[in-house]
Amino acid sequence: MENKLYFYNTLTRKVEQFIPNQEGKVSMYTCGPTVYHFAHIGNLRSYIMEDLLEKTLRYIGYDVKRVMNITDVGHLSSDADTGEDKMLIGAKREHKSVMDLAKFYTDAFMSDCGKLNIKTPEVVEPATNCISEFIQMVEKLLKDGYAYESGGNIYFDTSKLEEYHIFSNQTERELLVGVRDDVQEDGNKRNKSDFVLWFTKSKFDDQELKWDSPWGVGYPGWHIECSCISIKHLGEYMDIHCGGVDNIFPHHTNEIAQSEAYLGHKWCNYWFHVHHLNDKAGKISKSKGAVLTIPLLESKGYDPLVYRWFCLQSHYRKPLEFSFEVLDQMKAAYDKLVKRIGSLSREGDIDQERFAFFRKQFEDALCDDLNSSMAITVLYDVLKAEITDAAKYALIKDFDQVLSLNLTSAYAAKEEESAVDEELEAYILSRIEERKAAKKQKDYAKADAIRQELLEQGIVLEDTREGVKWKMA
Ligand code: AMP
Ligand code: ZN
């Protein structure tokens, strides 16, 4: 490992040098989506920046194992353990079973990630796969005196810990960010900060997904999922845990409490949090109006990678404001950039010394608390540098292992697409002419056959006063 990576650790509130537990290897956990709705582009900002961290680690030579859960049970509408399971709310909204809903939105999430070039983690585990493991963890916490039963539910007793608010030296404002929409109180708790490990039917009768447990039929709390799934796949000592800033409290605070009580030692060394994407009206969320999604951006003509490009221009620790005006500027800059890269000739020698120099600059930017906008500046420096086109092209291809913006292939793909378009258009216009001629000769059968043939190819003809128009079906 030549370069040392530094990034902000929420646990210590400092930009720190990253030192993994095992030399050369990194274990990394990401809180996955709650699959009751489409991921909005704010959620995806978190996953893009986590992807950047993972790819930076790989770029500088680490072997990374990354695990992500899929929350398909237990995440209630309020993070304070009250309200309804979000999955149940979604299932009712869409008249689907919870499992069908989970499958639909898990697939949609994976498709969004694919379009954004976000690498799929080595392990993706739905919470409903791990019920017996959750129960075993809760049993141990009860046995060791860290949990209690009340009102039919099992709670974690935060008063049993010397230090519960592990992130407590967060500023109050930062903690406020963590409290989601509609926090209500649960009267069964002994202490305000206690949280549910296992719900039983005594509390939520209409819960669709429930399992047998030593405490009655019920379902797991949200926080236990991530502790359990990460320990299952990454072991007792973890290097990096990621999420958006709203996960800091209570979710990650509770994960630390129960994991360390269960393991009896420190669990995760580095906590990486991505700040929120906002719009002019504030934090982007699913409860507010039309959900801003990747398919929505696509329907407006934006390549999803333009959104990734937009995210990479800003630092992950700064709130980012989204607007279509800025996205338009990003689109123009991205198109110009890939065009310029597409015009580079690949002929010529590559000066290895200059190559290493720019690669080091790029690495240095990323290793400085993931300074992605600086890394992009290095990319523009390469384009301006007095080196051969072949060297520029090779460097950009190399950088794109981390940036994942299809920098060397996007332009060729666009050209190919427009060449196909031109060919298709010429074909359609010639068939329209043929149809016109048939009509003139009163050969309506032939004219109809042409229309039908095109329709079968997905092309619709419309006779208008201005002449024949066509569109794709
Ligand atoms: P959820 O599906 O609600 O569990 O959230 C998935 C991920 O998106 C979590 O890591 C959240 O912290 C993160 N997240 C939620 N809202 C935003 C936002 N507006 N900007 C960035 N990340 C967010
Ligand atoms: Zn989590």
Image: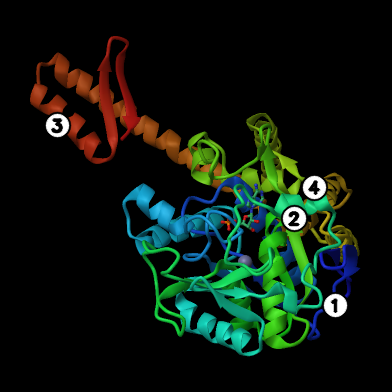
Q: Is mark 3 within 8 Å of ligand 1?
A: no
- Amino acid under disc 4: Lys
Residue at the spot of label 2: 396
Quadrant in which the C terminus appears: top left
Q: Nearer the viewer, residue 46 or 246?
A: 246
Residue at the spot of label 1: 19
Quadrant in which the N terminus appears: bottom right
- Of badges 1 and 2, the one in the foreground is 1
Residue at the spot of label 3: 449
- Amino acid under disc 3: Ala
Residue 318 bears which disc, if any? 4
Label 2's element?
helix
Mark nearer the N terminus (3 vs 4): 4
- Of badges 2 and 4, the one in the foreground is 4
Mark nearer the N terminus (1 vs 4): 1
Can residue 246 be seen from the camera position used here?
A: yes
Taking 393 as reference, is 144 left or right?
left
Label 1's element?
loop
Rendered residue at 32%/26% (across/down):
470
Question: Callout 4: few (<14), some (14-19), or many (20+) C-alpha neighbours within 10 Å?
Answer: few
Rendered residue at 61%/47% (across/down):
181
In 3D space, how far apart are the residues under numbered discs 2 and 3 (Cα atoms)? 51 Å
